[in-house]
Structures are given as structure tokens and as C-alpha cells.
Image (cartoon, rainbow, N blue to C red):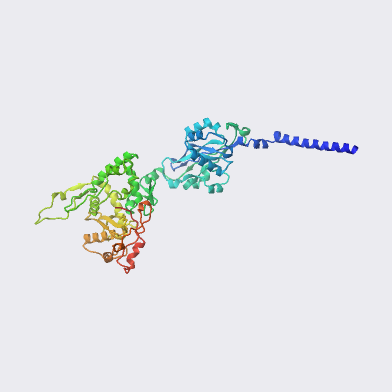
Amino acid sequence: MDQLFNRKYIIQGLFVLIALILLGKLFYMQVVSDRYFLSANNNALRKIYTYPARGVILDRNNKVLAQNQPTYDLLVTPNQVKEFDTLSLCSIIGIDTIEFRKKFDKAVSQSRFQESILQKLISVETYAALQEKMFNFRGFSVRKRTIRFYPDSIAAQFLGYMREVTPTDLEKYQGYYKPGDYIGKGGIEKKYEIDLRGTKGVTHMLFNSKNVAQGSYNNGKLDSAAIPGEQLVTTIDSRIQKLGEELTFNCPGYYVAGNRKFKCEHIDGPIALRKGIARSCNTYFYTIFAKLMTKNGGSYAKQQNTYEDWQNKVRKFGIGDTLGIDFPGEKAYKLFRKADYDKVHSKYWGNTTIMSVAIGQGEINTTPLQMANIMAIIANRGYYLKPHVVKVIGNGKGIDPRFKEKHFAGIDARFYEPVIDGMQDAVNTQIGTAIESKLPNIIMCGKTGTVQNSRGKNHSVFIGFAPRDNPKIAIAVIVENGGYGGAYAAPIASFIAEKYLTDSLSGRTINGSTIQMYKDANLLPNFLSKPFRPKSKTDSLLNKTDSLKKALPVKSKNTNNAFNKVADKPKTNATSK
């Protein structure tokens, strides 16, 4: 009996001990420690990151090169999202439900438990509208931050740019960046990223069940303020940089107009008029044409009126009409007027529609005589005499007086000199596309070109005059199937100018070939003796390579290989028609 009694109290004592332990643990969990309180209310306690102002970048005179503009991002934490009115949210931020679903799925794929950007760069008005209804969108929040702004839009390569972080960046800078953050890419934005970015601030914010902020947890004792990035003062002078960029354009090897990419044959980097002509840089002429067309405004109507004014001026150079020579059969080749384009494109056309005109293609056609006449205008610094083939009639009888009248192009003489400088460099400097055709002791000015030929090898073109001062000859040469301009047309023009000006030939070689080798060259397409099959060849303006362009034709398979070496390393050239 006593034994049973003792066992009873032992068991009761064990239960009492266990109860005391449980009560003590419960007291610790609920009163002493807040660990489980926070865990239970994890959805209501969030870390709100405050983004610091990125450091301002100044020039040597303390003029702002890069500064900040305020903006807002809509964030989402997927696991906190409750049922809500999707259409209402979409209407506020200006997207449809399909786009919303894509953005939300992307956020889920990044992390269900961390906030991600759903909509970037929302306006102040959108931010205000969201704040009024944010309690309806649990799991969503708005973050204020700054974006980079470059007041003068200069020194892009020097300054660099900002871009959203990539997975590689997140891995490299573990702990600081989150998906949707921006980081410096290129230039000093990248080099001095650590100094410029500053330090994020953190606020531990409590939210109630209606997604309304209740203030900082623990009176903000765990919060930290954002620290702005450092200011950088550079050695660059923005005034000089801006002037330099206004005088040049950048040639990356192509020009983008709308959704089309127009190819250039080379990458020239910063380029101005003189080098643009010497290098025959397509990108330069595309850029000039676009600036010309939009100088009075970018609307279709304003561009079209600007074009009409431009083509009227071009006609004064003898393009788009006959020159009135004393020879039968002269034709007026086409130069489109505004009305012509209206028939094709209605009222919806601008510089991107007719960009090929910038390099002499498209709706602008000329004869070799017209091109030679343009060279005469440039050589004379602004005027020409009508070309004629008869000098004297009978025993001293004069020709028609109209062939002695000066016709002015309407451009002041001083504006021709920069153009002539570029034409001089094209023939007389190492960067020129016709350097191999340089005349001994005579400064010839010229411009190479290539006429695209959809049926075979391109046509070689060169126009020019000589000498630069007190010019005596203006010339235009087109060699069918001759390839690029420096291959055939420029050498032929060089030999002709030399003979005309000196009444002799020096026996020199051009492109490694003598004048006799040029005479003997056979330029007839091989397919003329076979059934015609069009070559698979597309317009280089669409960024396709012209595989036929880089080979010079030869007389036969046994022709001296020295002559054909030029084909392997052609000089660069522009495209003109």
C-alpha cells in the first residue's frame, strides 16, 4: 500500500515539474524574448530600404555633368500578396493584365520572399494615386529613388551609364544590390561605383493587416539612415567637350534610323566633315541628312517641307534636270520632289523613310556629266558654265552665248573650302579612299563611290578636279563592274588628269598595277556568256555584306597576280549612286 502511495506522489511530482518547465518557457517566449513575436508577425514587419542620392559628377569648373532626378518604383513581395483587384492596380500604373502577369511571374521567379520591382519609373501622379489605394494592395509598396540625368548629354563614353544589375553583379556584390537596382556601367560611373553609390538606409517598418504603415519597430533603434555618394570633380572642361562633340559625329560602323540599321564600311569613331569626305563615311552623311531633315521640327509635315526646300537647292547644282548641252539625247534623271514621295508614302514619310538619299541612293539619279559638272561647281567655288562639245563653228564663229554664262548654285564661296579640304584628303592622305591614285606634284581633290549592282559586281565611281588651286579639269569616271571606287575609277581619273595637266604619263603604278594592266583588264561579267542567274546579294544598307565588292576583275586566269593583290585589301569607300 505504501509503495503504491509513493508511486502516486512521484508521478504527480513529475507532472508538476513538467508544468513548471512549460510555464517558464512560455513566460520567456511571450514576455522576456520577442523572437517568436516577430516570427509570428513576420508579414507585418518589413525592411524598407532607403536609397541614397548618387554622387554628383562635375567638370573641372564645377559645372554639373551628371546629377539625379527623383522617381518611384512599384515593388512586390509575392508571398505577401493577397487577393486584390488586378484591373484597378493595372489602370493606375498604366499596363494591361497580360503585362502585369508577366511582370509578376518574373518577380516570383526571382524570389517569393523578397521584394522585386514590378513597375519602374512611375510618375509623381501615379505615385500619388497609388498611395491613396495602397491599403487595397497587400504585398505591394512604392519606393522612392533617383535616376541619373546628364544635363548636357556630352562625354557619354567618358561618363558611362547606369544599368539594372545582372545576376553576375548580384553574385559579385553579395549583400548590397537587389534585383531591380542600378549599377554604373562603363566610364567613371563604373570605375568609381563604390564612391558614387553611397550606402543604403534601412527602416524596420510595422504594417497592420490593411497594409498601412504603423511606424518604425522599436522606435527606430534598429534603423539606419542612407549615406549619399561622394561628389566627383573631373578634369574635363564641359564647354570644350560640348564644342568638340558639336563639330563631330560618332561612326560605330553603322547608323540606326527607326528600326533599320544602315551599314558603313568601317568604324571611324568621332568624325567631322573633312574626315567624313576623305573616308567616305556613310554614317557621317546619314547623320547630316537626319539633322538637316529635322532642323525645323521632327513632325512629318515639317520634315517634308524641309526636304522640299533642300531638293530645290540641290537642283541648282544641275541635278534632277537637263544641263542643256549641245548634244542630242540628254535626259533629265530623277530627283524626287515632295509630291513624288506623297504619291508613294501618302503623308507619312520623313528622314528615316528616305535615308538612302543621304548617300546618293534611292530616288536620286545622275549622269556622269552631271557629276563632273558638280565637280566644276565645287572647283569654281560656286558656279559653272553649261557643258558643251563644240568650241568653235567655222572660221572663228562663236558658239551660243548661253554656253558662256555663269550659273550660280546659290552657296557662298567660303562654304566650299571645308568640302575641298575633305576631297583633298581623300586622294592625298593615308586615311583617304583614293590615296593610291595620288598625283605626283599635283593636288587632286576627289571622292570615291560605289554604285550597287543587283546583277553582279558593283560599279566603281570617282569624281574630282585638279589642281586644287586654279583648277583646270573636272572629271567623273564610272567603271561598270569595277568594284569599289578606289579600285578602277580613281586610278583611271588619276591617269587622265595627269595626262591632261602635264601632257605626259610618269609610268607610275596604282594599286600595284601599271596603266597597261588597267587597259588590259577585262571587266565583262563572266555570266554574260552563260544563262543569266541573279547573284544572291542584298543591299548593304540592310547590313548585309557585299561579297562581290572586294575583288578586282582580271583579264584571264593567267593575269599577273600582282594586279589582283589589290582585291584582297581594298580601301574603304562610301556608297553613292
Query: What residue is drawn where x is 50% and y is 34%?
Result: 87
**Residue 466, can we see it?**
no
- Quadrant for residue 534, please give it: bottom left
Q: Is residue 439 left or right of residue 28?
A: left
Q: Is residue 453 left or right of residue 140?
A: left
Q: Residue furthest right?
A: 1
Up the image or down, 50 lies above or below 550; here it is: above
Q: Is residue 394 left or right of residue 408?
A: left
Query: What residue is drawn where x is 13% and y is 52%?
Result: 399
Q: Relative to the observer, which residue lies in front, 386 or 138?
A: 138
Residue 539 position within the rendered picture, expressed as x and y whole percent measured from the top left: 35, 53
- Quadrant for residue 137, please give it: top right
**Residue 433, can we see it?**
yes
Residue 507 position within the rendered picture, expressed as x and y whole percent measured from the top left: 26, 66
Residue 570 position within the rendered picture, expressed as x and y whole percent measured from the top left: 35, 60
Q: On the rendered image, what quadrant is the N terminus found in?
A: top right
